[in-house]
Amino acid sequence: MMNLLTALIYPVLLGFLVLSVMLRGISIRYRFLFYLGASFPTGAGLCSLILFTAYVVLPAGAKQISLIAGFFIGAVLLGYRFFHLQKDLRRSGFFWPSALNIEKSLFLQALPSGLALLLFAYTLVTVIQFYTLSAPMDVFVYGGGDARFIWALKAKFLFRAPETWLNMFSSKIFWSNTDYPLLLSGMLAWGWNWLGRESPLWAPLVYLGFYLSCSWILVWYLSLRISPASGWIGGTLFLVLMPYLQNSVRQFADVPVTFFITACGLTLAAALRSNQGKLFAVSGLLGGLAAWTKNDGVLFVGWIYVLVGAICVLRCLGRSKDPFASLRWFTLGAFLPLLAAGALKFFPETHGVYLGSGVLQKYLRNDPSPLITGWPRIFTIFKAFYLEMSRPDKWKGLWGFFILAVIAIGIRKEKPRGDYPWILFGIVILVNAGYVAIFYITRYNLIWHLRSTLDRLVLHSGLLALAFCFEGLGAFSPKFARPDPGSQEKISP
Amino acid sequence: MPETLGNTHRSFSLQRRGAFLFYGIILAIIGFSDLPAVDPGNLSLRDHLFAGNESLVPDPGSEFSVFKPHLPVGGAVSFLMDIPYFPYAPAAEQLYTAQSYLVPLVINIAPTEQKALVYCSNDPLAAGWMQKTGYRPVLKLADGKGIAEKR
């Protein structure tokens, strides 16, 4: 067990170091919670990128190279942090770096906050207890079908045969979705390389890490935006939404990709409101890692580019100073994971279900009429979305609150400039509109495709919808807390 | 002007009341939420796993372990099963499980490789498929199961 924990701690440290370097010198409230939420997933993404690079460059020695390179990068980042820590401490006079300077308001400022924290802590312990009791069951310790036959399968190619790892892209095993990105498989293989064996407990630990990170990142955002009490209550509501817990137990990639979609969306919202370039870069990194987790993440990043691009154009028309800076920062952060996800598409024999499959060309070249006249198909898809989102046992009314939040924000009289109240709503709508389009052109039987994937696809935007509900319905005052640079922390090492 | 301020004040008040109601409903939802039941037997399994006894949960594909010594480590073999591969058929899971267990060996669903892993329910079915796809049995491991080679 100790070995497993050491394998888990390294990505947490690496993610923390990278994020703390990226966010150095900018103001962000409740930074501790942000690191708590984002460090492990970011570190997992970086570990898999290092591993992927090592396998591309020198497959025979990739296991050792990836571990050594990981340590080297960690050591360089640690050195950089210590070097600047001295400077920052001299300038700020803080004894502790602000990453460790936990703001008391998170816990004890008011009675509601303390009580909400207790509720969150109790639910967290209960959920972890449930997870550890469900995961060891003989089937679930290895996960559901996708976990075993896609993500762990690719990880086995990486771990067992580094010299011939490219066989995972063989068209002979096309059913394993050979063009899928490798964050999860890379992270599984990275842990096995560290441990020296295919430990069946490693995957459940990784998925638990992603699941808990989802709750922390929500708590961070809602604390920042509304109040710590809202944060703890929002985090607790996430913990009682069963689909996320059950999908984590079954080791589906949807909770990890949900984390990256949520974290990218929430940091993007915070970046737009505070206009801090480095936050855009962090948002870009998290969005890029969504694309490196699952092909759905590629679609998501595409939507984010559309959204940020539109905002940049509006800023340009409004004659803002350097209107495209946010797009540049975002791209800078997203560059490496997007490069890896893009490179995968050029490996020999990889072929996608949609990209490169000719499905779009079929419609556009041969008979484009179904794209215009397929109303019954559209109706079927919308009905399926309605039936899924209105299930109280799964969503506990979340999507009903979402509609109420739209109305509440729509009729709100006071809308501060630069507050972007619709940004989360926009992302939720775009993400689901993308899935509607995918179902529309699917080459599979539509009903089978909806039955087998829709419940998991709806998860992706669920946490952004939850945050939007709290923004719309849970704010006691129309004036939201703003991440005001310089007002909370003078120096943020 | 005072009328406008009054309207704004009413709006704030409405928002506050709405927020209280919202948190009340959310807390009720949280309070009434429950986790699915878990088999109490899992407790001892969990404790054993945490104690390092990982062999208690063997790989789900361990039924293919008998084939392993007779198959190449790398390369590719074909896979013959009761029905031809069809992605929606439950039988396809056997193929996926075999592939997952036998990595780095690649398993081809097309009967084109020199060697084939035969995984049928019984001998007559296996013989029929081998006949149809041009294979001859070289090793029998169980009823309907074994290794075959191209004729």
Image (cartoon, coloured by chain):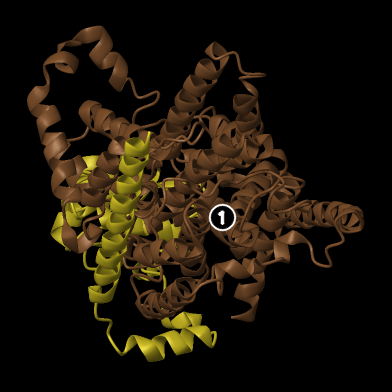
- Residue A8 shown left or right of residue B27 in the figure: right
- Crowding near pointer 1: few (<14 within 10 Å), some, many (20+)? many
Residue A201 to residue A31: above or below: below
Q: Give the image location of residue A212, x and y in percent.
A: 48, 65
The total number of labels drawn is 1
Residue under circle 1?
A41
Q: Quadrant of residue A316?
A: top right
Q: Give the image location of residue A256, x and y in percent.
A: 46, 53
Residue B49 to residue B5: above or below: below
Please give the letter of the chain rendered in yellow.
B
The answer to which of B22 and A388 lies nearer the viewer is B22
Q: Amino acid at mark 1?
A: Pro
Residue A159 in view, yes or no: no
Report helix, strand or loop for mark 1.
Answer: helix
Residue B33 in view, yes or no: yes
Q: Subunit of mark 1?
A: A
Q: Quadrant of the C terminus of chain A?
A: bottom right
In the image, farthest residue toward the front? B2
The answer to which of B128 and A249 lies nearer the viewer is A249
- Residue A297 shown left or right of residue A5 in the figure: left
- Residue B39 shown left or right of residue A94 in the figure: left
Residue at the spot 49% in from the left edge and 45% down from the top edge:
A266
Q: Give the image location of residue A144, x and y in percent.
A: 33, 61
Residue B26 to residue A457: above or below: below
Q: Quadrant of residue A461?
A: top left
Q: Give the image location of residue A207, x and y in percent.
A: 47, 63
Residue at the spot 53% in from the left edge and 88% down from the top edge:
B51
In the image, farthest residue toward the top? A365
Q: Quadrant of the N terminus of chain A?
A: bottom right
The answer to which of A450 and A222 lies nearer the viewer is A222
The answer to which of A188 and A470 lies nearer the viewer is A470
Please give the letter of the chain rendered in brown.
A
